[in-house]
Amino acid sequence: MSPGHTRLLAGVVLAALGLFFGFWLTDSFLILFASGAVLAMSALGLGVVVGWAGEISLAQAGLTGTACYLTGYAVRADGWGWSFLPGVVVGVVVAMAISVIVALPTSKVSGIYLMLLTLGLQIALERAVFSRPDLGGGEQFVRISRPQPFGISLESERAFFFFTLVILAGVLLALALFRDSRHGRALLAVRTNRKAAASLGISPWRYKVLAFAVAGALAGLAGALQGPMFRTVPNLAQFVEFQSLFYLAVPVLAGFESLWATVVVAMMFSVVPQIFEAVKLSPSLLAGGALMAGLMLGRRGIGGVVIDALNSRTIRAQLEHRG
């Protein structure tokens, strides 16, 4: 089965599942799956940095939280009072700018040093942004209204679930086109062999900065959707340094070969702990187990295992048909 056919099959299956869940699930599960879609957006951005650029970031939760609080303040009546779209633009631009700034030293530092640098950024964002009561609301409940794109009400959980799916589909399409473009191929070449890429006139530094820009933009988009999704700004515990490991565990377990695998794993991370709440399945245990499983599976992760299984089945079917 060709990569194009595999992507099409995955898209059709997940679209069918999305329609099924959207029309048959209760409101409580719809908000969980919408949360999974938002997590997938941020995790997909992190996958560009880790899987495509060969670097690592421990600041994705901080970037997502920063965009969440800034967008929330921008659209609140007691904040700037903007409409939703300009508020989203602010969150995305700020998160992307911060991500690009932290990526600038990648020409001199990499590996563990960049990991420590991004961890420092995460902690700095927690101290500088999350501690501000005017952004996070402090102990008060801050209401954030849901947008009405093209006059369509998103007040119901079902409507907002489909809204997040449409945005996620757009993100997947954009990333697939980017990966198949010359810039995407250049980024993958940098990850494979930095010196060889440089000999071909590809600047490893510029493309690593580009990868961080993409990750920041998707973190900003995910953060901008958090407030309307919950109708308030989430508690800062949702974006502390441990959550960056939780975000990292999603693409590591899914692998960096399949965008769809990242979506599926993100949905599992959002829904499974709630299903097994009675047995006290800790998100910490889930993230830790996912990281270990991802390391054992290798960079192709679960997505690579599924793709290999589908290809093997196709080959067997062809051989049986010829026989």
Image (cartoon, rainbow, N blue to C red):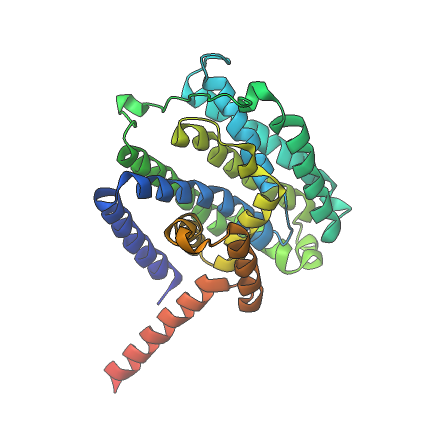
Q: Residue furthest right?
A: 108
Which residue is pictured at 21% across the width and 43% down the height?
23
Instruction: Decide if residue 277 is in sight here.
Output: yes
What quarter of the picture does the C terminus occupy?
A: bottom left
Q: Is residue 63 left or right of residue 14?
A: right
Camera-nearest residue between 45 and 8? 45
Q: Is residue 10 left or right of residue 273?
A: left
Camera-nearest residue between 174 and 303? 303
**Quadrant in which residue 29 is drawn:** top left
Q: How many marks?
A: 0
Residue 299: where, in percent of width, then height?
55, 63
Residue 181: where, in percent of width, then height?
49, 48
Instruction: Decide if residue 255 is in sight here.
Output: no
Above or below, 28 relative to 263: above
Camera-nearest residue between 12 and 62? 62
Which residue is pictured at 32% across the width and 33% down the height?
160
Above or below, 307 relative to 131: below
Which residue is pictured at 26% across the width and 83% down the height?
320
Q: Is residue 167 left or right of residue 104?
A: left
What quarter of the picture does the N terminus occupy?
A: bottom left
Q: Residue furthest bottom?
A: 323
Which residue is pictured at 53% across the width and 26% down the height?
69
Q: Residue furthest left?
A: 23
Residue 106: where, in percent of width, then height?
72, 45
Camera-nearest residue between 213 and 56? 56
